[in-house]
Image: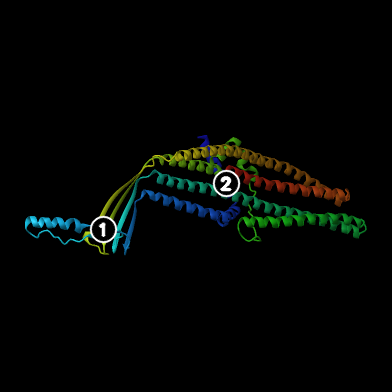
Amino acid sequence: MMRLLFLCFLFFIKSYSWSQTQVLNKYIQKGLSNNLKIQQHHLSIDESELNARAAKSYRRPQLSFNASYLLAEGGRRIEFPLSDLVNPINGTLNQLTGSNDFPTDISNFSETFIPNNFQDTRLKLRYAVYNETLKYQYLAQQQLVSLETAEQVAIQQDLIKNIKIAYYQYFKSDAVIGIFMQSKKQLEGVYDFNKKLVDYNQKTADILFQVTYEIEKNNAELLEIEQQKENAKAHFNSLLNTSLNEPIEKDGNLKSGISNHDLLEADLSELQNLALQQRPELVQLSEAAGANEILVKANQKSMFPTLNLEVTSGFQGTGYRFQDDQFLNTLGVGFDWLLYDGGNRKRKTEVAQIANAKIQKDIEIAQQQIRLEVQKQFQALQTAQQKITVEQALLQSAQSRYDLLRKRYESGEVLLIELLDAQTKYTQARLGLEVVEFDLLIRLAELERALGMGG
C-alpha cells in the first residue's frame, strides 16, 4: 500500500512539474516531433511491428494458385515393345479360338520423358499443423518490438533532459545579462554623480577614470555573456531541429515554487527503487534477456517434428482444357523430424544460455550504476537547494551594504573605492543567486532523467 501511495505521489510531482511549465512543455513536444533520430526510430518500430504481424501469419493457412503449360520436342524417350509382346500372343489366341477377336496389329509404344502440350493448373492450400520453430519466430519478433520501444523511450528521455537544460542555460544567460545591464546603469549613475562634482571643482577628473574602468570591465563581461546567450539559443534550437536564430519564448512560471519542489523532500531509497522500476535502459536489457530465452526455447523446440497439411484441387493433362477427365484432387501430409544434427542445436542452446547469463550481469551492473546516478543527482539537487539559502543571505547582506554605502558616499562619508567594492559584491551576489536557482532547475532535470521520468 505504501508503495502504491508513493508512486501516486511521484506521478503528482511529474504532473505538477509539467503543468507549471507550459511554454517549456510546448518546446519539448516540438523537439520530440522534429527530432530526426526519434523519427528514424519510429520507422524501426513500425518495421518491427510489421515483421511481427508477418510472422504471426504462421497460424493461418496459405492459399496459392499455380498454373503451368509445357510444350516440348525431342529429348529422351521411353521405348516399350508392346507389338513384340502382344501381337504373337494374340495371333496364337486367334488360332486356338478360330477367330480374329484378338488384334495382331498393335504397334510398339514410344513416348518422350518430357510431356508435350501439357498443362497443370491447381489451387494449393497449405497449413502448418505443428511447427514450433515458426511460433518462436513470431515471439522473437514481438520481443524485438518491445526492445525497440524501450530504446525509443530512452532516446526521448535524453532529449527532454537536454531541451530542459538548454532552455535553462539560455535564460540563465539572459538573467545574467539583466544583472550586468543593471550594474552598468548603477555605474553610470556613479559616473554622472562624480561628473557633477568634477564640474563644480569638488573632485578631480582622475576620479572619473576609475569609474570608467569599472564600466568598461562590466561591458566586457556583458559582451561575453551575450555571446554565450547566442550560443545557448543556437544549441536549444538545434535540439528542436529548427532555425538556430529562432526567438525563444520565456516561461513566466519557470522558477515558480521550485525551491519547495517535492523531489527535494523525497526519500533517496524510494527514488532509487522507482528508477529501477521504470528506467528504459533496464527494460531494454530485460527485453534482450527475454529474446535470449526465446532463442533457447526455439532451439529446444527444434528437436520436435513438424507436421504440414497440403490440399490441392485443379486440372492436369494434355491440352489446355478443363474437363472432367483432367480434374485432379490431392491430399498430402508432410512429416519432418531431424533426429540428429551433430549436436549443433545443443551448442546453439548453450551459447544462448551464456548470452543470457551475460545479460543478467549487465542488468546487475546497470542497477548499481542507476542507484549511484540517482544518489549523485539527488545529492546535487539538495546541494543546489542549500546554496540558494546561502546565496539569498549573501544577497540580502550585499544589497543592504551597497544601499548604505551609496547613501554615505553621496554624503561624502566614504571613498569611491568602498562604494565600487560594495557595488561589485552586490552584483556578484545577484549573479550567484541567479546561477544557483537555474542550477537547481538543471539538477532537477537531471534527477528526473535518472528516475526515468518523461518520454
Front-most of residues 398 and 364: 364
Front-most of residues 38 and 200: 38
Is disc 2 placed on a helix, strand or loop?
Answer: helix
Residue at (80% x, 47% y) in the render:
425
**Image side of residue 154 versus residue 234, left or right:** left
Check disc 2 and report the residue beneath it: 16
- Residue 271 vs 332, above or below: the answer is above
Residue at (57% x, 45% y) in the render:
453
- Residue 268 vs 44, above or below: the answer is above
Q: Position of residue 260 (x, y in %)?
A: 63, 42
Residue at (86% x, 50% y) in the render:
409
Closest to the camera, between mark 1 and mark 2, is 1
Residue 79, numbered circle = 1
**Image side of residue 271 versus residue 291, left or right:** right
Residue at (66% x, 55% y) in the render:
235
Q: Position of residue 35 (x, y in %)?
A: 58, 56
**Whether residue 271 is visible:** no
> On the image, which quarter does residue 263 sit in?
top right
The residues tagged by marks 1 and 2 sit, at their Cα atoms, a distance apart of 93 Å
Three-letter amino acid code at the position of disc 2: Tyr
Q: Which is nearer the N-term, disc 1 or disc 2?
A: 2
**Image side of residue 249 versus residue 48, left or right:** right
Which residue occupies the extreme left position in the image?
98
**Whether residue 115 is visible:** yes
